[in-house]
Image (cartoon, rainbow, N blue to C red):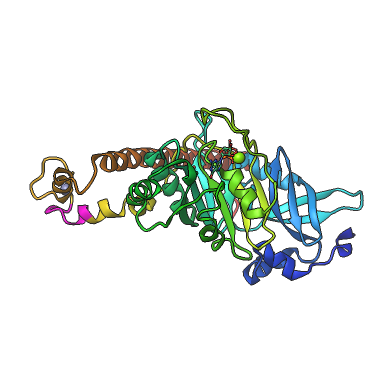
Amino acid sequence: MTSSNSQLSIPSDHLASLGWDEHRTIEFAPYTEHHLPARVSRVDRGACDAIGSSGLLRLTFSGALLSAAVADPVSTPCVGDWVAARAWPDGRVTAEAVLPRRTAFVRASVSPGVSHGQVLAANVDLAVVVEGLHPEPDLGRIERFLALAWDSGATPLVVLTKADLVPDAAEVRADVALAAPGVEVLVVSAETGEGMDALRVYAVEGRTLALLGPSGAGKSTLTNVLSGATVMATRELRADGKGRHTTAHRELVVLPGGGLVVDTPGLRSVGLTDVGESLDLVFAEVEALAEECRFADCGHDTEPGCAVREALESGELPERRWESYRKLQKEARWMAMRHDARLRAEERSRWKRIHKEVRAAGRIRP
Ligand SMILES: Nc1nc2c(ncn2[C@@H]2O[C@H](COP(=O)(O)OP(=O)(O)OP(=O)(O)O)[C@@H](O)[C@H]2O)c(=O)[nH]1
Ligand SMILES: [Mg+2]
Ligand SMILES: [Zn+2]
């Protein structure tokens, strides 16, 4: 089949600024003849915007992609994905395949009864958990976002915004840092520019940052400051600091100085998926304490020689932190069980189908 792809050349330096590298070239090898690579910048139902070497493309999803999405909704192209795009003689351009995701920020689906997750952004290098200093940051929410951030495979970073609105930013930062072991916590103000240089350091050529956090935290404002232009609408100033969500869709923005940012609509909270070991990273100091308990299977309840209890009693481990750990652990375990149950159900229906086919064939062929 002929295609008009030959009209579109691939200046690889441009692709590199979108995050393309030699591994992607290898992954793309099966598509080089008829397809072009493009990075998804925005998704609507059944279609998306994507940035290729020739600029912005409007892509519809191929039939194969759509039916794959029915079987496994997580496979639908999402913001940050690399797709193989194909131009057709009738002028349509379709997304035909999604290249393997290196990282994926997945939250539990918000629909009841649905056990698959929702991919918020793919191929993110730096998961930036954004929380305002005013009103006071919600430590439990930060821990939750960090669990998903670690689980995504991206490196987490916490950014506390609106430093200009509080007198004790350094103090609050210290509290947040205790809830984010091993994670850098930046304090910034889009208003005064404080801390913005420290954040800019992270936005290097080809690297993708995703901004995640509640509505009103200042994600779009940060995106605009990093871009040096108004690329995202931000909320009109309101005295109560509350109100509707301003950003309604996820969008990948290419920064003029290098780097890319995914701005996302605010999430009051995120449901954990089966985050596995990631909680051990979010609660690294709790894990370290638990290692010191006398009994390896200590329930940290009434057992003698429990290092966790001792730390709670001495105040070394804040009660809030311990309770948050237990809560998130319970949630993650429950999601893991639900996930296992779904896999078992899928396996059962697969076998039922195979048996039916075998019966229909009348005999088992060699
Ligand atoms: N004083 C002050 N206000 C800020 C700062 N950053 C953001 N704001 C204000 O906070 C409000 C919310 O900012 P947005 O950038 O729209 O917040 P958002 O996180 O994108 O919100 P959603 O799109 O709803 O998720 C706006 O009125 C901003 O002007 C800051 O550093 N200092
Ligand atoms: Mg916004
Ligand atoms: Zn213990």
Residue 106 visible (yes or no): yes
Residue 262, horizontal then vertical, whole percent: 61, 50
Residue 176, horizontal then vertical, whole percent: 37, 47
| In this picture, residue 180 sits left or right of residue 69 | left
Residue 214, horizontal then vertical, whole percent: 51, 38
Residue 210 or residue 1, whichever sits in front: 210
Picture quadrant of ligand 1:
top right
Answer with the quarter of the image where residue 258 lies: bottom right
The residue sitting at 55% across, 49% down in the picture is 192
Q: Quadrant of the N terminus?
A: bottom right
293 inside magenta stretch? yes
Answer with the quarter of the image where residue 248 lies: top right
Residue 117 or residue 185, whichever sits in front: 185
Name the outermost residue toward the left. 304
Q: How many marks?
A: 0
Magenta part of the chain: 289-296
| In this picture, residue 141 sits left or right of residue 27 | left
The residue sitting at 90% across, 49% down in the picture is 91
Name the outermost residue toward the right. 90
Residue 21, horizontal then vertical, whole percent: 64, 69
209 inside magenta stretch? no
Placement of 174 over or under 335, stated as above or below: below
User: Magenta segment, principal secondary structure?
Assistant: loop
| In this picture, residue 358 sits left or right of residue 35 | left
Q: Quadrant of the C terminus?
A: bottom right
